[in-house]
Amino acid sequence: MSTVTIEVCRTVSDGLCEAMTRLVPQLSSAATVPSADQLREIVTSEGTFLLLARDGDRIVGTLTLVTFRIPTGVRAWIEDVAVESQARGKGIGEALSREAIRIAASRDARTVELTSRPSREAANRLYRRVGFEPKDTNVYRYAFGDRGL
């Protein structure tokens, strides 16, 4: 593999759409691949950063960083970290994570948080190596599904 570069995505291209078609199913078999319009919404959002890992022209990994202000300060959250299966173990996830931390710090975030399933052992080792620590908390989810409001 040649040198992988990390960049913030600024525009939606056919290459980005194709990469999402490959990478999103690796996150969840139930996830829907975002449309070009949905990707444009992400890319143009003030507090959202879609990071791309490129090996030459090919996108081999992505990470989404969201920053937001709350009454106690600026917070950041990492979501949807995906690296192509054949590119794993080469430092791409770490490079994406470190760039996300750098961007969060530049926006004066007090913390950067993420979640990772316990079964993703390599990912959990990576996050600890980068400096994330497990948080003693309960994570709750409200799923809209068939519920009406």
Image (cartoon, grey):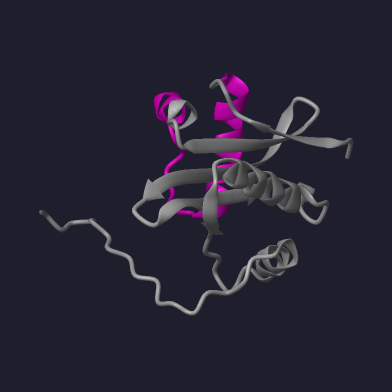
Report the residue that reaches farthest toward the bottom: 136
Question: Could you say which is closer to the camera, residue 54 or residue 24?
Answer: 54
Query: Does the magenta portion include 39?
Result: yes
Point out residue 10 in the picture as x, y percentages from the top left corner.
57, 23
Q: From the viewer's perspective, is residue 4 above or below residue 134? A: above
Question: Could you say which is closer to the camera, residue 4 or residue 107?
Answer: 107
Point out residue 71 in the picture as x, y percentages from the top left corner.
34, 53
**Count of numbered circles on the image:** 0
Report the residue that reaches farthest toward the left: 149
* Residue 34 seen anywhere in this rendered image of the structure: yes
- Main SS category, magenta section: helix
In the picture provided, is 118 more to the left or to the right than 1? left
In the picture provided, is 54 more to the left or to the right than 137? right
Residue sitting at x 57%, y 20%? 13
Residue sitting at x 53%, y 50%? 109
Q: Quadrant of residue 54?
A: top right
In the rendered view of the protein, which quadrant contains the N terminus?
A: top right
> From which residue to which does the magenta span run?
13-41
In the rendered view of the protein, which quadrant contains the C terminus?
A: bottom left
Point out residue 8 in the picture as x, y percentages from the top left corner.
62, 31
Q: Quadrant of residue 146?
A: bottom left
